[in-house]
Image (spheres, helix red, strand yellow):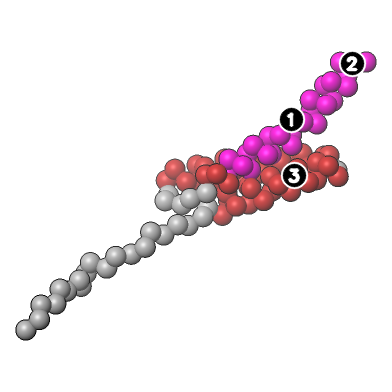
């Protein structure tokens, strides 16, 4: 008789990587805000602010779940922050140089 090993109950499952949806939205809106910053400044700033909010929500959610996407959330926060800060710095420079 040949010996057969039985692996019933010990199935090896591949790790499941779920991307956080808010992180994806944050990264997308961050890239979109930079694009709109070149076209319509105020729309780009509003989209950047929304991107920051989605990025923060995503980071908070990823603390308690096993979802991935921290890089996308950070990308959305950084690009949204740049989109808000850059026009403000230009306005401050324009006012102080008068």
Q: Nearer the viewer, residue 63 or 70?
A: 70
Q: What residue is drawn where x is 71% and y is 34%?
A: 82
Residue 33 in picture, x, y percent from top left? 74, 44
Give the mark nearest the N terminus, 1 or 3: 3
> How far apart are the alpha carbons under marks 1 and 3?
12 Å
Read off the residue under disc 3: 33
> How far apart are the alpha carbons under marks 3 and 2?
27 Å
Residue most extreme to the right: 98
Residue most extreme to the bottom: 1
Residue 70 in picture, x, y percent from top left? 52, 44
Q: Is residue 55 above or below residue 5?
A: above
Give the mark nearest the N terminus, 2 or 1: 1
Read off the residue under disc 1: 85
Give the mark nearest the N terminus, 3 or 2: 3
Read off the residue under disc 2: 97
Q: Is residue 26 left or right of residue 89?
A: left
Residue most extreme to the front: 2
Residue 6 in picture, x, y percent from top left? 16, 74
Q: Is residue 7 left or right of residue 83?
A: left
When asked about the image quadrant of residue 96, the answer is top right
Q: Is residue 57 visible?
A: no
User: Is residue 87 a member of the stretch shown in magenta?
Assistant: yes
Q: How packed is label 2: few (under 14 Cα within 10 Å), some, or many (20 or more)?
A: few
When asked about the image quadrant of residue 81, the answer is top right
Magenta span = 73-98
């Amino acid at each position: 008789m040949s010996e057969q090993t039985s692996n019933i109950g010990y199935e090896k499952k591949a790790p499941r990587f779920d991307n956080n949806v808010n992180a994806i939205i944050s990264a997308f809106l961050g890239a979109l805000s930079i694009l709109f910053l070149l076209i319509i400044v105020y729309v780009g700033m509003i989209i950047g602010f929304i991107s920051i909010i989605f990025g923060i929500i995503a980071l908070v959610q990823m603390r308690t779940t096993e979802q991935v996407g921290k890089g996308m959330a950070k990308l959305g926060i950084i690009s949204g922050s740049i989109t808000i800060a850059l026009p403000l710095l230009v306005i401050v420079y324009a006012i102080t140089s008068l």
